[in-house]
Image (cartoon, grey):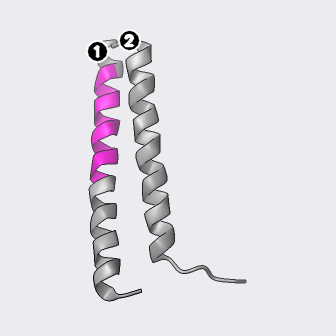
C-alpha cells in the first residue's frame, strides 16, 4: 500500500474516531436529560455504523498475520 494511501486512511480513521466520541457524548447527554428512548436508540445505531467503518479501515491498515 502506498504511503499516501495509508496516510489518507489514517486521516479518515481519526475523523471517524472523533465522530464516534462525539456520538458517545451526545448519547450520554441525551440519557442524562431523559430524552426519548427511540432517539437514543437511533443515535446508538449511527454510532455502531461508525464503529463498523472504523473497523473496516483498521483492517486495511493492519496486515493479516497468518499464525
Residue corresponding to mark 1: 33
Q: Is residue 44 left or right of residue 35?
A: right
Foreground disc of the pair 1, 2: 2
Q: Is residue 43 left or right of residue 29?
A: right
The residue under the point 33% across, 13% down is 35
Which image quadrant: the N terminus?
Answer: bottom left
Residue 7 image-quadrant placement? bottom left
> Could you say which is closer to the camera, residue 53 or residue 20?
53
CB-based contact (under 8 Å), mark 1 and mark 2 = no
The residue under the point 28% across, 83% down is 4
Q: Residue furthest right?
A: 67
The question of residue 24 being in magenta is answered with yes
> Could you say which is closer to the camera, residue 37 or residue 60?
60
Residue 50 rendering spot, x and y as whole percentages = 41, 47
The residue under the point 40% across, 22% down is 40
Mark 1 burial class by Cα count in 10 Å: few <14, some 14-19, many 20+: few
Q: Secondary structure at mark 1?
A: helix
Residue 44 rendering spot, x and y as whole percentages = 43, 32
Residue 32 image-quadrant placement? top left
Give the residues drawn in magenta, as a range. 17-30
Q: Using the image, determine if residue 22 lies above or below residue 28.
A: below
> Could you say which is closer to the camera, residue 12 or residue 40?
12
Residue corresponding to mark 2: 36
The question of residue 27 being in magenta is answered with yes
Which image quadrant: the C terminus?
Answer: bottom right
The residue under the point 34% across, 70% down is 9
Instruction: Tell me the chief SS of the magenta region.
Output: helix
Amino acid at each position: 500500500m502506498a504511503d499516501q494511501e495509508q496516510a489518507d486512511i489514517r486521516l479518515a480513521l481519526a475523523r471517524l474516531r472523533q465522530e464516534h466520541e462525539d456520538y458517545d457524548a451526545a448519547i450520554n447527554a441525551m440519557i442524562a436529560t431523559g430524552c426519548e428512548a427511540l432517539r437514543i436508540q437511533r443515535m446508538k445505531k449511527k454510532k455502531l455504523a461508525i464503529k463498523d467503518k472504523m473497523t473496516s479501515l483498521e483492517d486495511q491498515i493492519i496486515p493479516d498475520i497468518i499464525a
